[in-house]
Image (cartoon, rainbow, N blue to C red):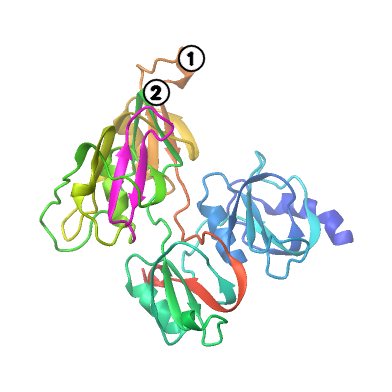
């Protein structure tokens, strides 16, 4: 008990001014409150990586598989305070707490027995073992995580099946809106198209046309071209529709899947742009485009006053933690002058994240090992 009374003082002494370098984990310890987000993680290492990538997380609490107070096993609570120090520390069986890291490894090599990652499937195939399933996932450029059912799985039809799953590997702003006087864009250090294909893709996007139905995911996008790139990245997407209309779904990219789809299925609809995913060609560099009068809202990691949008983009590109930005032009219509010439640097998590994590007997789950060899 004495240790828990002294622990807050030990934490104050342990957290350096630079933050992010405290890597020691506190077993059976909880940092109550200070939550900014909760996600699912299969283990504390994944939770700590998520905290490190999140734009504001400084410390976290993970509820382990032996947590028995309620049904929140595998919950990862990302936390923040202005001081960088948890407001409280308490003893809690089944919980592990810690801090974000300064130089994390993104290799997720652990295998999780009797754990399922439900959802996010884009392909399933027979497999003799979880090891083979992981190798298939690692070879498939679209796969970031997987679940495998063993020969003892209760449903015979699904035994020894490998489920390949996707999680976004590119940064997607949490919200995109139109706003006069703002300029947004991406870091120019984002990965460019690789390979030997030299032919530029034809956008072939239909204006004022909708592909109704077959939606499986809706994400923000800054333009029809941005939406097409997101569709082309997602292994399940076959076609898309993008809305610029001033409705609740403004600046929304609707990713769609249909095995046999024909563009003739489109219907006329004002303000909607639609198209197919692009294949076997070099995609246009949407990451290099500027989005005029567009706000990439939220996910701010830092701000600075600069003279123009070029300098803001350069600051984002030079900062390894910045993925995208929004710059407030001098012409911004708000009457508050303090908002103008402000460069907002932003980032989101891009590590593979299961949509959910649950305990299920005779299921084995894990991640692609591509990041372990990069």
Residue drawn at (51%, 87%) of the image: 151
Quadrant location of the N terminus in the rendered image:
bottom right
Foreground: disc 1 or disc 2: 1
Q: Which of marks 1 and 2 is nearer the N terminus?
A: 1
Q: Which mark is residue 336?
A: 1
Front-most of residues 215 and 292 = 215
Specify the quadrant of the image occupied by residue 83: top right
Could you tell me residue 218's position as x and y percent?
A: 41, 46
Quadrant location of the C terminus in the rendered image:
bottom left
Q: Name the residue under label 2.
A: 341
Could you tell me residue 145's position as x and y percent?
A: 45, 68
83 falls in the magenta region? no
In the rendered image, is residue 110 in sight?
A: no
Residue drawn at (41%, 56%) of the image: 168
The magenta segment: 236-257
Indicate whether 17 appears above or below 184.
below
């Amino acid at each position: 008990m004495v240790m828990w009374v002294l622990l807050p003082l030990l934490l104050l002494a342990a957290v350096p001014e630079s933050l992010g370098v405290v890597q020691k984990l506190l077993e059976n310890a909880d940092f109550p409150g200070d939550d900014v987000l909760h996600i699912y993680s299969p283990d504390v290492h994944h939770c700590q990586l998520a905290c490190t990538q999140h734009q504001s997380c400084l410390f976290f609490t993970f509820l382990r598989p032996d947590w028995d107070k309620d049904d929140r096993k595998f919950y990862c609570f990302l936390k923040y305070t202005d001081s960088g120090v948890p407001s409280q520390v308490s003893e809690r069986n089944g919980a592990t707490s810690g801090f974000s890291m300064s130089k994390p490894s993104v290799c997720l090599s652990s295998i999780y027995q009797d754990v399922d990652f439900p959802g996010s499937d884009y392909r399933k195939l027979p497999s003799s073992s979880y090891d083979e399933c992981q190798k298939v996932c690692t070879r498939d450029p679209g796969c970031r995580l997987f679940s495998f059912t063993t020969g003892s799985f209760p449903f015979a039809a699904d035994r020894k099946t490998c489920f390949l799953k996707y999680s976004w590997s590119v940064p997607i702003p949490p919200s995109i809106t139109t706003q006069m006087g703002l300029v947004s864009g991406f870091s120019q250090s984002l990965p460019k198209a690789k390979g030997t294909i030299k032919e530029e893709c034809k956008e072939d996007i239909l204006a004022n046309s909708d592909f109704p139905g077959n939606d499986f995911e809706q994400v923000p996008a800054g333009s029809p071209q941005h939406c097409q790139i997101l569709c082309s990245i997602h292994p399940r997407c076959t076609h898309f529709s993008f809305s610029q209309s001033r409705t609740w779904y403004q600046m929304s990219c609707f990713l769609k899947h249909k095995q046999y789809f024909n563009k003739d299925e489109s219907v006329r609809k004002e303000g909607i742009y639609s198209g197919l995913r692009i294949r076997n060609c070099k995609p246009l560099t949407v990451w290099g485009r500027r989005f005029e009068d567009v706000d990439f809202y939220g996910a701010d990691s830092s701000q600075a006053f600069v003279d123009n949008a070029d300098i803001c983009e350069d600051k984002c590109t030079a900062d390894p933690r910045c993925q995208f930005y929004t710059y407030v032009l001098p012409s911004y219509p708000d009457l508050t002058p303090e908002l103008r010439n402000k460069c907002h640097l932003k980032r989101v998590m891009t590590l593979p994240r299961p949509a959910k994590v649950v305990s299920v007997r005779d299921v084995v789950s894990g991640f692609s090992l591509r990041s372990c060899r990069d």
